[in-house]
Amino acid sequence: MKQVLIISNSNTLSSLLVKLLHEKYHVLVAENDYSSIVLTISDVRPDVVVFECKTYSDVKDNISKIRSKFISANIVLISSYLDSADREEIKDDNNVDQIIVKPCSRKSILAAVQSSPQRKKRNIDQKLLHLIVELYGSKSILFQRRYSRISNYLQRMNSHIDYDLDYVHDLLAYYLSIMTTMDDTLTMDLLSGNHTKKEATPSLIKQIDKMEEMAGFVMVEIDTKPLREMKYINKRYNGKGLPSDDVKETEIPYASRLLRVLFDAHYLEEKGKSLGECIFILNSRKDWYDRDILSVFKDSLGDEASYYNREVFPLGLQRDMIMAQDLYGVIKGKKVLLIKQGQSLTEKNIDFIHRHAHDILDVTEPVLIRESVLLCEDDDA
């Protein structure tokens, strides 16, 4: 049985919709509040999402969030009023599949819910793009490593996210190929993530703008939406960064938010950080990233991202810390394993280390401790 999620602040209308649909569908109801929506659907992946509202502005932010989470869902909008500007905005956003303006009939609602709209496929010439990437990658190891590592991230995320990651993979190649048209020193600065040249990112955005302007003068029709998504890859979730505008949070295109997380993880791995350290550092950067995406990314990496090792001097050891190394001692001339890797430290262990650090154990360097990586909520990050 298909899952239908009804989102409305009107109990009367919600009840009428439930009565109309409950015989053929499993129906869930939530208020037009994103926290309430998430709590209602829990582990459910709705096939149809019906937004009931007075005006489009009341629901557009939550429609965007739901589309980001459930790319294949049939989204139906039932509104009391839509003017021409609303309709144009809905068309540009490309998040709503069916529009119904009240008053409406039971038949029109059923038809909208039962329809199976084909989401418009955003086309990028895959063969050409990936050929450019492969050719340029043969002369730049930084380019090749960035492309390969992020491609691997996307592959690992494939079973953890309901989004067209094939498209994001093509967008990655598209984005990197534009870098190859810039001055080599700026390209290398962008690829390394060092950001030593202040003009690098603005120059890249200007290059993307130039391509967007040229799109109207070429013989073949070009979809400019990927170009807009590329421009926002360098934008933080809180709206800081380029381009300089008021776009922030879920207004930033989903693919841009996703690639921002993956690019920054790549830069950290390039600097020798483990996956656990990468997630720990990304999580510590308050308001930089979409936390839903960061959480999915962490889950896709498995156990590798669930912990990181850090050095702690003997005096800094605390109860319940987990050993990330075996600790040996020399007793009567023999090397003896005293504390195993993975063992949780007790007060007795720590007291022993403090008392015998310089004789039996010869511990003069920091001890490796394994720390769990826990994602904080936004307010606590």
Image (cartoon, helix red, strand yellow):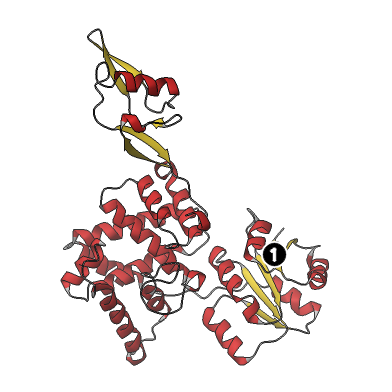
Residue at the location (51% across, 58% down)?
A: 378
Residue at the location (40% across, 60% down)?
A: 261
Residue 177 shown left or right of residue 18 in the figure:
left
Rendering coords of residue 279 (x, y %) = 40, 50
- Whether residue 156 is situated above or below residue 174 in the rendered picture: above
- Whether residue 81 is situated above or below residue 31 in the rendered picture: below
Residue at the location (43% across, 43% down)?
A: 306
Between 198 and 348, the residue placed more toward the observer is 348
Q: Assess disc 1: are there few (<14), some (14-19) or many (≥20) residues with their C-alpha within 10 Å of its C-alpha.
A: many
Between 70 and 7, the residue placed more toward the observer is 7
Rendering coords of residue 118 (x, y %) = 57, 73
The answer to which quarter of the image holds residue 234 is bottom left
Taking the image as drawn, is residue 260 in sight?
yes
The answer to which quarter of the image holds residue 339 is top left
Residue 233 shown left or right of residue 45 in the figure:
left
Residue 265 shown left or right of residue 137 in the figure:
right
Taking the image as drawn, is residue 167 in sight?
no
Q: Quadrant of the N terminus?
A: bottom right
Q: Residue furthest top?
A: 332
Residue at the location (19% across, 58% down)?
A: 141
Tag 1, which secondary structure?
strand
Q: Which residue is mark 1?
A: 5
Rendering coords of residue 195 (x, y %) = 25, 66
The answer to which quarter of the image holds residue 302 is top left
- Whether residue 97 is situated above or below residue 366 in the rendered picture: below
Total numbered labels placed on residues in the image = 1
Q: Amino acid at mark 1?
A: Leu
